[in-house]
Amino acid sequence: MDERIGRRAVVLLIEDDPGDQELTRRALMEDVVKTDLHVVCDGAEAMEFLLQEGAYDADTAPRPDLVLLDLNMPKIDGRQVLERVRANAGLQSIPVIVLTTSRQEEDIIRSYNLGCNSFITKPVDMGDFIKVIRELGHYWFELVTLPAEVGV
């Protein structure tokens, strides 16, 4: 039997905006896709979570099935986080979705060159934002076939 069946998907949201954190939490809570959402506020904390260092261990920082990454954050920005994740053999298979306010062509190109799986510009409208998060959940956890180490 597949050990992933019945397990909640682990989503790591790397986002410094409390409003976007709450909208993401709300969208995932109200959806049929069962997720455990973990939120970190900057790139340095994100790397500690992913590497299970500092305040994080295997119990407090499970390996994410999906990372939602903002680009513009304090300490270590999202571009640097993405670069470090893709350079780490133990993390590089985790799907990373850039979810940002940026519409800059340079950010889009650089994010894909660094290995993001998708680049999504955050909708300004709250209803549209929630819809995007729900569609992401359905796509990544119902339609896509992921390797056992990152799938649900």
Image: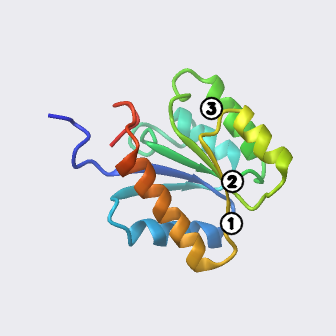
Q: Quadrant of the C terminus?
A: top left
Closest to the observer, 7 or 134: 134
Mark 3, residue position: 85
Mark 2, residue position: 70
Amino acid at dot 3:
Val
Closest to the observer, 63 or 4: 4
Mark 1, residue position: 17
Which mark is first along the chain, 1 or 3? 1
* For the residues bearing labels 3 and 1, Cβ distance under 8 angstroms: no
Residue appearing at x 54%, y 29% in the figure: 91
Marks 2 and 1, Cα distance to the nearest angstrom?
9 Å
Q: Is residue 76 visible?
A: no
Residue appearing at x 61%, y 78% in the figure: 126
Which mark is first along the chain, 2 or 3? 2
Point out residue 125 in the picture as x, y percentages from the top left corner.
65, 78
Question: The residue tagged with tag 3: helix, strand or loop?
Answer: helix
Point out residue 42 in the picture as x, y percentages from the top left corner.
69, 51
Which mark is first along the chain, 1 or 2? 1
Figure check: 21 above or below 80 = below
Amino acid at dot 2:
Asp
Amino acid at dot 1:
Asp
Point out residue 117 in the picture as x, y percentages from the top left corner.
59, 40
* For the residues bearing labels 2 and 1, Cβ distance under 8 angstroms: yes
Q: In the rendering, which numbered label is found on residue 28? A: none
Marks 3 and 1, Cα distance to the nearest angstrom?
22 Å
Point out residue 57 in the picture as x, y percentages from the top left corner.
46, 38
Question: The residue tagged with tag 1: helix, strand or loop?
Answer: loop
Residue appearing at x 47%, y 70% in the figure: 27
Which tag is nearer the camera, tag 2 or tag 1?
2
- Would you call the spot at circle 2 few (<14 residues within 10 Å), some (14-19), or many (20 or more)? many
